[in-house]
Image (cartoon, rainbow, N blue to C red):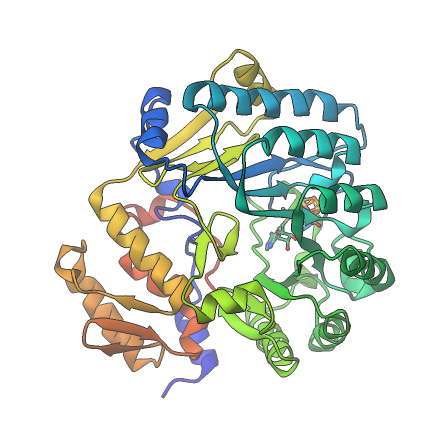
Amino acid sequence: MKTLNDLIKKYNRPGPRYTSYPPVPFWNNAPSEGEWITHLKNTYQESVGVDLYVHVPFCESLCYYCGCNRTITKNHEVEEFYLSALLKEWEIYKDKLGSLKINSLHFGGGTPTFLSPQNLERLITTLLQNKSSAFIGSIEVDPRTCNDGHLEVLARCDILRVSLGIQDFDPAVQKAINRDQPPLMVETLVSKLRAHHFSSINFDLIYGLPKQSLESISSTMEIVAKMRPDLIAFYSYAHLPDRIKNQRLIAEGDLPTPELKRELYELGKKLLLENGYADVGMDHFALPSSFLYKALQDKKLHRNFMGYVDKKSPILIGLGPTSISDSSMSFVQNIKDMKAYQQKVMSGALPIEIGHTHNEKDLLIQEVVLEMMCHNEIKVSNKENLPYWAEIEAELKAFQEDGILELVKNQIRITPIGKGFVRNIAMSFDYHLREQATKVKFSQTI
Ligand SMILES: C[S@@+](CC[C@H](N)C(=O)[O-])C[C@H]1O[C@@H](n2cnc3c(N)ncnc32)[C@H](O)[C@@H]1O
Ligand code: SF4
């Protein structure tokens, strides 16, 4: 029987994160604007509505590890131009599709609370003119830029699920990543969120950051346990300095070795479990009282580009540069460059840069990958239709021998130890990766 370290050595290799299937680097056959609108019209049902994602790509200061799409500026005059472009993009969709029922709205970034409370409220009330009765609103909040005005607007506008960017509470780690955020600042914010009756608080944490040690993870987890957020995302630091320039500001010598990085994860996970959190999968943890844990129990967990959710519409419309949209028949991603995005939108056209129209194989594998990530098991009843099935079958047997999964009739069950290797199992089913592996540089799977 292999030890965890043996498994990590064997399986830790570059691979996609599978926030979508196919992963963005393998997209091809982009729909034209006309085809994209037809896909949306064919999929849309008033009873289930659409999910909206709004990207706010501004931050006041740079976190050295950051791999997100954002612009660093302290100039808040950009808000006005940006809001006009976002609202224009939404107008274009409404002109083409009519009034859409909004099932959920998620603000991501960058830093959504970079916008002033007044601008945030103007944006939300315009977008939510046709809100479903079961509406869910969520937002990523940087504790350093969230004021009382933001909290009042969010509470008033029904944006009640909040995700706080924490990363680590250790002062040496915070210094090494250029993110000064004392625990007291977060504690105060958490108390205010509870006083305003926000329904869910998530903390984003990262393991594998510079200067992290077993001691620093222990003390971070101790502070986290006291604040007791409902949910925790415990992400693996994706270090790609060749592609992400700002990560070159991190001294390589300050980074933990791959072995220590895995130990940091294992220790963090152990402490979270001891403190009553359940392992949802893909680096996510939840208190039994949380909506995510309930969804896991009821087998109603879903995943979209932003992570795990308990409700999902067949359509996701993403507004803003780099935002991704999903029609269930195809994906599109908006232009990345801010200026080009604004110019395209203001000319009256949708700012689509790239896209992918699914074929039957993509849809089959998409289902397999989602089942695996949301339910830790896969039904492979129509397996003969999966491309490269002979190769997949051989690899699944090897995963079984390594204790990563169990093969039971037409079902694959991922074992508790196997939860850390879900990306590797997904890679086995990924026919695009088999055919184009050398084309793209991915982060390490573990
Ligand atoms: C787009 S940020 C939004 C949160 C907000 N901007 C903040 O930092 O407070 C979402 C999360 O992505 C994660 N993240 C950013 N860069 C990362 C990287 N290189 N590797 C792993 N996770 C990363 C961080 O945990 C961060 O909180
Ligand atoms: S981690 Fe968040 S606050 Fe820091 S630079 Fe990235 S998006 Fe901005």
User: From the viewer's perspective, is 69 left or right of 224?
Assistant: left
Looking at the rendered image, the quarter that the N terminus falls into is bottom left
Q: Please name the residue shown 42% across and 53% down the image.
A: 18
Outermost left residue: 384
Determine whether 388 is above or below 377 in the image. Answer: above
Q: Which residue: 48% across, 65% down?
A: 295
Left or right of residue 47: residue 181: right
The answer to whether residue 356 shows anywhere in this view is yes
Q: Nearer the viewer, residue 430 or 188?
A: 188
In front of the other: 130 or 222: 130
Question: Residue 155, percent across and down?
Answer: 73, 47
Using the rendered view, name the quadrant where residue 177 is placed: bottom right
Q: 403 or 294, which lies in front? A: 294
Please identify the residue farthest to the top as the structure is shown: 347
- Placement of 424 over or under 26, stated as above or below: below
Q: Quadrant of residue 233?
A: bottom right
Q: Position of residue 83 (x, y in %)?
A: 67, 25
- In which image quadrant can residue 436 be found? top left
Residue at 30% x, 59% y is 368
- Looking at the image, which residue sits at the far bottom? 1
Q: Is residue 47 above or below residue 34?
A: below
Q: Residue 68, position in %: x, y?
A: 60, 44
Query: Where residue 187 sits: x, y (%)?
Result: 82, 63
Q: In the drawing, does residue 210 fall left or right of residue 365?
A: right
